[in-house]
Image: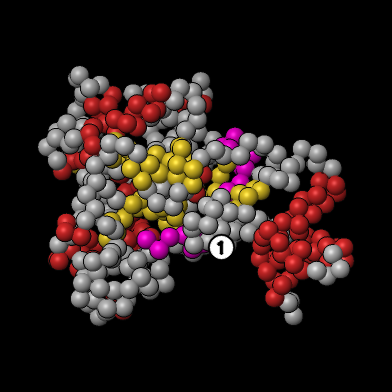
């Protein structure tokens, strides 16, 4: 039977994707060197054990370019529910430079109204107790999803809801669009003579319970707001894509992974930031455009976007993949009754294997040369890659 201390040592190295069988000989050697003094091995989150493992790898494989220091136990610095490790076993050398933050924050001019007074009694479930999913009748918070909750008792997306969301992503033309009278996106392209709005997809939303609701934090309709619960790792892909994100455990279909967190910018702030960035590589931003078509004229401070280039969470490392990505982005309402601002959450579209890279279809039109956010050259490797035309030239 494995002792608790041995088990905890394996748990620390598993978080870095290191197999137990490779750790065992290193651990035995250290116990002998330290005369079975576990405190020396456990210090600084098993730093001695991890360093010894990487030194052994370098010696045995003669991989001189490998840097044993190129691993971080927790890039979130304790701000997430679970540690998120980073490892570079390809000798990339350049660690990502950004400020980790677990929640969205306003950059400067974005206008948001988050207050209890704006949430009407009919838009929350103040009379609920415990778990809303256990109630025989769905509460008011289920009204956004047709009177049925989007989640199962196991915290997964219901298959029918997930199927509809995937359909909207794969074949958006079969679904409804809304059109702005004065589109912020077109205005950012040409402020003097903007073209007509190309349309914004009328998206399916999840409405989670919030602070004005009577249920507790363990309610089954509070999934995204509880944060990351699965084991994730940032790694160097070595496929021309730079850093990527993978799961350190098998994930079922419909599982919540993380939300896209970044600075909340106005559409014009994002346009100016991209204009001033030159050829510097930036994280692909998100446009919160679900409500843009409902207003006659949307002010710039109300046309909101998320950008994780300088500040964000682990989602900034999720790479793009055309059409057959294993994650899908779904808008989630939590603290606001309208759709000017919402959370963008990632759920698995199928079962995902341990150590498999997590990918997301950014929804890029690679043929749109006039888009204010310039498309990169796609390296997704998908058989349905939409950037095939450009690669031929």
The N terminus - image quarter: bottom right
Residue at horizontal 67 percent and vertical 60 percent from the top = 45
Relative to 131, residue 296 above or below: above
Horizontal side of residue 172 vs 358, given as left or right: left
Give the overall secondary structure of the magenta segment: loop
Residue 185, percent from left and from top: 27, 31
Residue at horizontal 29 percent and vertical 34 percent from the top = 267
Horizontal side of residue 370 vs 354, given as left or right: left
Residue placed most toward the observer, 249 or 228: 228
Residue placed most toward the observer, 225 or 201: 225
Residue placed most toward the observer, 91 or 180: 91
SS assignment at label 1: loop
Q: Would residue 14 be visible to someone looking at this image? A: no
What's the magenta region? 225-242
Residue 36, percent from left and from top: 83, 70
Residue at horizontal 66 percent and vertical 48 percent from the top = 71
The residue indicated by pointer 1 is 250
């Amino acid at each position: 039977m494995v002792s608790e201390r041995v088990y905890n040592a394996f748990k620390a190295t598993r978080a870095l994707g290191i197999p137990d069988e490779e750790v065992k000989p290193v651990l035995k050697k250290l116990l002998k060197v330290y005369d079975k003094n576990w405190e020396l091995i456990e210090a600084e989150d098993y730093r001695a054990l991890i360093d010894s493992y990487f030194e052994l790898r370098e010696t045995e494989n003669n991989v001189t370019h490998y840097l044993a220091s190129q691993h971080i136990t927790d890039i979130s610095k304790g701000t997430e529910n679970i540690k998120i490790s980073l490892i570079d076993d390809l000798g990339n050398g350049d660690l990502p430079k950004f400020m980790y933050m677990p929640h969205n924050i306003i950059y400067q001019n974005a206008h948001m109204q988050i207050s209890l007074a704006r949430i009407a009694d009919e838009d929350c479930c103040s009379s609920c107790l415990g778990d809303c999913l256990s109630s025989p009748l769905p509460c008011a918070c289920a009204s956004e999803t047709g009177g049925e909750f989007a989640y199962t008792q196991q915290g997964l997306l219901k298959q029918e809801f997930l199927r509809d969301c995937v359909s909207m992503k794969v074949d958006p033309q079969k679904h409804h669009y809304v059109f702005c009278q004065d589109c912020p996106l077109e205005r950012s392209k040409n402020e003097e003579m903007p073209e007509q709005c190309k349309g914004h997809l009328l998206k399916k939303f999840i409405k989670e319970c919030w602070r004005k609701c009577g249920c507790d934090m363990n309610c089954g309709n509070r999934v995204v707001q509880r944060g990351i619960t699965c084991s994730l790792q940032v790694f160097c892909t070595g496929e021309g894509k730079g850093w990527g994100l993978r799961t350190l455990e098998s994930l079922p279909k419909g599982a919540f992974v993380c939300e896209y967190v970044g600075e909340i910018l106005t559409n014009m702030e994002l346009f100016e930031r991209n204009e001033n960035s030159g050829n510097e590589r930036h994280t692909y931003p998100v446009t919160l455009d679900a409500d843009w078509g409902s207003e006659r004229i949307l002010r710039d401070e109300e046309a909101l976007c998320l950008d994780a280039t300088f500040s964000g969470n682990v989602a900034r490392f999720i790479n793009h993949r055309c059409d057959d990505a294993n994650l899908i982005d779904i808008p989630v309402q939590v603290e606001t009754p309208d759709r000017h601002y919402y959370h963008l959450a990632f759920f698995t579209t199928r079962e995902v294997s341990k150590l498999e890279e997590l990918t997301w279809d950014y929804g890029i039109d690679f043929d749109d040369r006039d888009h204010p956010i310039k498309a990169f050259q796609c390296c997704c490797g998908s058989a349905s890659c939409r950037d095939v035309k450009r690669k031929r030239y």
